[in-house]
Amino acid sequence: MANDTLTVTDNRTGTTYELPIENGAVRAIEFRQMRTDPDDFGLKVYDPSFMNTASCISRVTYIDGDKGILEYRGYPIEELAEKSTYLETAYLLVFGELPTRSQLANWVHEITFHTYIHENIKKFMDGFHHDAHPMGMLVSTVGALSTFYPESKEIFDEEERMTQIYRLIAKMPTIAAFSYRHSRGWPYAYPDNDLSFTGNLLNMLYKLSEPKYSPHPVLERALDVLFILHADHEQNCSSNAMRAVGSSHVDPYSAVAAAAAALYGPLHGGANEAVLRMLSEIGSVDHIPEFIKRFKAGEGRLMGFGHRVYKNYDPRASVIKRLAYQVFDVTGRNPMLDIALELEKIALEDDYFVERKLYPNVDFYSGIIYQSMGFPVEMFPVLFAIPRVAGWIAQWYEMLHDPEQKIARPRQLYLGEPKRQYVPLGQRGQIDAA
Ligand SMILES: CC(C)(COP(=O)(O)OP(=O)(O)OC[C@H]1O[C@@H](n2cnc3c(N)ncnc32)[C@H](O)[C@@H]1OP(=O)(O)O)[C@@H](O)C(=O)NCCC(=O)NCCS
């Protein structure tokens, strides 16, 4: 049987090293022993954007991008989307096992009882400009929660930590809904703790003068399924931000604000908005061949297609596509769907997309569903952040328990100027004097 090692010869010195391979990886620190002389720092590995670097050992989420597999704690996403609820899935992500009946009841109770926010947070939110982007409001307000709960700094106190976990999962929908209502100029609607997690979110978003809001059960469940699908995606940009910022042992509200800020970027949480823009630009099924030609010529990209990890159909996209029909039975068919379906059909038969393994990703259909449910595009990243907080917490919780994790502090390859002497202002030439 072959050794699980990697033999490396440093041709600068002729020395050969044998590095252990564990779990399909070699430890980067092993390269440090490869020096040209005793003063040499040792060899580093260069990997911008972590293209091939495992930053942690994780047991939360598994993805096989070639096969189109996504599992939370070993459970296939399709099965969770069909049988679980968002709150049960959040428990699974954070603690590693599906809850028993009493564990689930306690978890749901605690989260339901932390949905209210301090009145001063509401006043603080009033201070945002009338057309403030809801995601900008969410990022800042979730960070501000740390000032309301200073005990959240006690991140190694298990009881305190649990309280902050309940609060984070519970208050994200409230802050999200208040951000939305602020941007519409509507009065805030308080949480209704008789409703489910997503039923209450719909209540806080859409309740007007009715004494009690009743969410449509199909839309309530559809949102819950969308939340399950978005709850975690292993070491993506925002989870990496959560771990990196959390590794300084800051309180979880500040770390979640950093993660949410990462999600705000158009390359991460904003792609479904781009899909909708593209679909309206295409405008009708007849224009698709012309647009496909343009995408192939490198004039823009077919948004919602392709993924850094998935080189197969994104399993979340299949679930969302089925979900779309259920939502449209209630809301009426979104005309964008016909364009999306035809676009997908043509792209999946086209050599350009086939050769590059470009398949629909999670964002291809989610924007159409959100739009049909009445959400404006500015709310799309917010609707991503609400469930993703479960994943961020799970990643953060795991990191805090991992004895190998220290403060995240990458190395760099310095290629700037070598040491030089300060030049007084009067002796720096006249380049910009003209
Ligand atoms: C997601 C994405 C950024 C992944 O990028 P990546 O893994 O770095 O892939 P690359 O940018 O290296 O693309 C590989 C090839 O496929 C092409 N390609 C990738 N996505 C494409 C798309 N959506 N439309 C057209 N061509 C695409 C690239 O032009 C490149 O072609 P080339 O080899 O001829 O140069 C990319 O597929 C993309 O921009 N998709 C659209 C945006 C989107 O939906 N984002 C949401 C992701 S969840």
Image: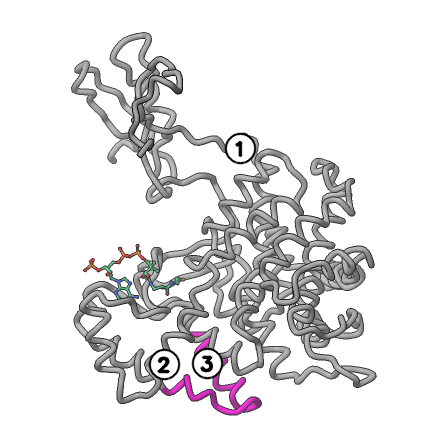
Q: CA distance from mark 3 to mark 2?
A: 13 Å
Among the 4 quarters of the image, the one containing residue 274: bottom left
Give the secondary structure at mark 1: loop
Q: CA distance from mark 1 to mark 3?
A: 40 Å
On the image, the x and y values in percent for residue 145 come to 72, 50
Residue receiving disc 3: 322
Vertically, is 183 above or below 246?
A: below
| 124 left or right, relative to 51 | right
Tag shown at residue 340? 2
| Foreground residue among 369 and 416 | 416
At 53% from the left and 76% from the top, the residue drawn is 370
Q: Which badge, 1 or 2, comes first in the chain's sequence?
A: 2
Quadrant of the rendering where the C terminus is positioned:
top left
The magenta stretch spans residue 98 = no
Vertically, is 213 above or below 397?
A: below
Among the 4 quarters of the image, the one containing residue 388: bottom right
| 299 left or right, relative to 104 | left
Residue receiving disc 1: 405
What is the span of residues highlighted in magenta in the rendered image?
A: 318-338
Q: Is the residue at mark 3 in contact range of ligand 1, meaning its CB lies under 8 Å from it?
A: no
On the image, the x and y values in percent for residue 226 come to 54, 71
Amino acid identity at mark 1: Gln
Vertically, is 142 above or below 173?
A: above
Amino acid identity at mark 3: Arg
Quadrant of the rendering where the N terminus is positioned:
top left
Q: Which badge, 1 or 3, comes first in the chain's sequence?
A: 3
